[in-house]
Image: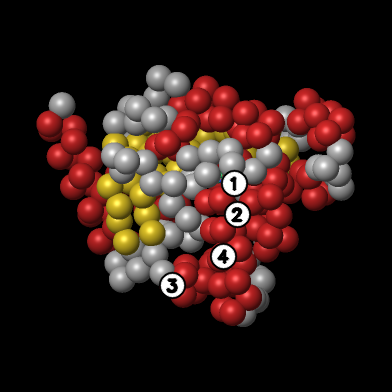
Amino acid sequence: MIIAIDGPAASGKSTSAKLLAEKLKFLYLDTGAMYRCIALAVIENQIDIKNKQSLKDFIDNFKLEMRTINGVSVFLINGENVSKKIRSSSVSKKVSEISAIPSIRKYMVSMQRSFAKNTKCVVEGRDIGTVVFPKATIKFFMIASVEVRAKRRQLELRRLGEEITLKDLQKDIEARDKYDSERSHSPLKKAFDAIEIDTTNMTLRDQLSVMVKNVNLKINRK
Ligand code: DC
C-alpha cells in the first residue's frame, strides 16, 4: 500500500510524511533526498553533466545505499551517511538541474519502485502520484505560499548552521519551482486524483490530522 505525497519545495511534505508514516507504522521514503544524494555526488566529483559519456560513466558507477533505521530511509554513498550534507544550500541550488536529467530519473524511479515493493510505504516527492506510483492508494498534493516556504527553509538551514536571508531563499525556491514544474520529463504536477492541502496557515498537527482522516476514509471505503 502506497501513500503518495507530492508538492513543491518546503510545502510541508517531509515532516508530515514522516509523522504520518510513524503513526501508521509504514516505511517512509523521501525521494527528494535521493535526488539530493546524486546531486551531491555530481558536485563532489565535479562531473560534467553536459558531457554524455562522463554522465553515463558516472551513473553506471554510482551506488546509492538505502537503509531503513526506525522506519526512516537513510542514505549512504560509498559507506558515508550523507543525510546532513544533502541539505546544504549548495546541493539545493544544483539539485533541480540534475534531477531533470532523464537517465538520472530512470535510475531513481527503478530504485524507488523496488524499495516500496510489497511494503506499506509513505513516499514523498514531485512525481510520485503521477509517474512513480500512479496507482497509489491515496495521493496528497501539498502547497503553501512562497513566503512561508522560505521561512521554513531558513529554520531548517539555521539548524544546520547556515544563515541565508529570506529574500535569497525565496528566490531559490521560486527558481526551483519553475525548474521542477517546467521540465519536460516527469514535471511537478498535481495528479488528477490527489487531495490538495494548503499548509500555509496550518500547524503540523492540523496537517497530520487532515491526512489521517483522509487515509481512514479511504481505507474504510475499500
Ligand atoms: O523535496 P526536496 O526539496 O528535497 O527535493 C529536491 C529536488 O529533487 C527537487 O528540487 C526536485 C527533485 N525531485 C524530483 O525531481 N522528483 C522527486 N520525486 C523528488 C524530488
Give the residue number, with chain letter if any, for mark 4: 173
Image coordinates for residue 74, horizontal then vertical, percent: 58, 40
Q: Which mark is residue 179?
A: 2
Furthest toward the top, the residue is 118
Image coordinates for residue 150, horizontal then vertical, percent: 52, 71
**For disc 3, does the CB lie below 8 Å from ligand 1?**
no
Point out the frontmost of discs 4 and 1: 1
Give the residue number, with chain letter if any, for mark 3: 148
The secondary element bearing badge 2 is classed as helix
Q: Which mark is residue 183?
A: 1
**For disc 1, does the CB lie below 8 Å from ligand 1?**
yes
The crowding category of the residue bearing disc 3, from other C-alpha atoms within 10 Å (few below 14, some 14 to 19, many at least 20), is: some
Q: Amino acid at mark 3?
A: Val
Q: Residue at x 18, y 36 (%)?
A: 218
Q: Residue at x 87, y 47 (%)?
A: 46
**For disc 4, does the CB lie below 8 Å from ligand 1?**
no
